[in-house]
Amino acid sequence: MTDQLKELYRQVYELTKSKCTNRSGKDNSCGRCCSPASCIDSVTVARSFGIGISDPPTGHTFIVDGACSLEPWERPLCTIHHCEIFGRGGFYNDPTGEDTARYFELRNLISETHEEEEFGHVPSEHD
């Protein structure tokens, strides 16, 4: 994975981490979305992208001391997923829509960069 792609995943993480809070306002980035099944799915996707990560250190999840022990680019499925985006298509607390637009811009750049790395270019409908 290129440094450019790693940086795009980091930017998505930075954009969304503050939006993953529970109703009490506490950080929920390792809350209801993180489960043994989610970790297995995340590892499967990461490995399909050629990311060499080992099995979770706890045997079930990558959660160590209340936080994920993987870098954002090592857990692409988790980094890209956000409940509000997938549930309603945008962030709740985003009155201007700028964060939502930036999220989709980054997500599209990540997709294009993955395709460029895999195919040498972004495939068209004719490929």
Image (cartoon, rainbow, N blue to C red):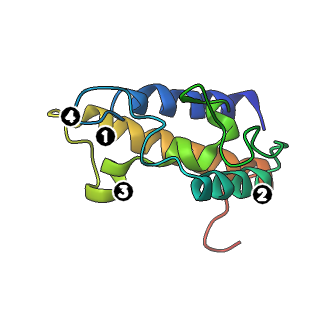
Secondary structure of the residue carrying numbered label 1: helix
- What amino acid type should be assigned to the residue bearing mark 4? Asp
User: Which residue is pictured at 50% across the width and 31% down the height?
Assistant: 13
Quadrant containing the N terminus in the rendered view: top right
**Residue 69 percent coordinates (x, y):** 66, 30
Earlier sequence position, callout 1 versus callout 4: 4
Of 60 and 78, nearer the camera is: 60
> How dense is the environment of label 4, judged by Cα within 10 Å: few (below 14), some, or many (20 and up)?
few
Distance between the Cα atoms at labels 2 and 3?
A: 22 Å
User: Which residue is pictured at 55% across the width and 51% down the height?
Assistant: 35
* Residue tagged 3: 86
Res 100 label: 1
Secondary structure of the residue carrying numbered label 2: helix
**Residue 52 percent coordinates (x, y):** 85, 43
Earlier sequence position, callout 3 versus callout 4: 3
- What amino acid type should be assigned to the residue bearing mark 2? Ser
Distance between the Cα atoms at labels 3 and 4?
A: 15 Å
Earlier sequence position, callout 2 versus callout 4: 2
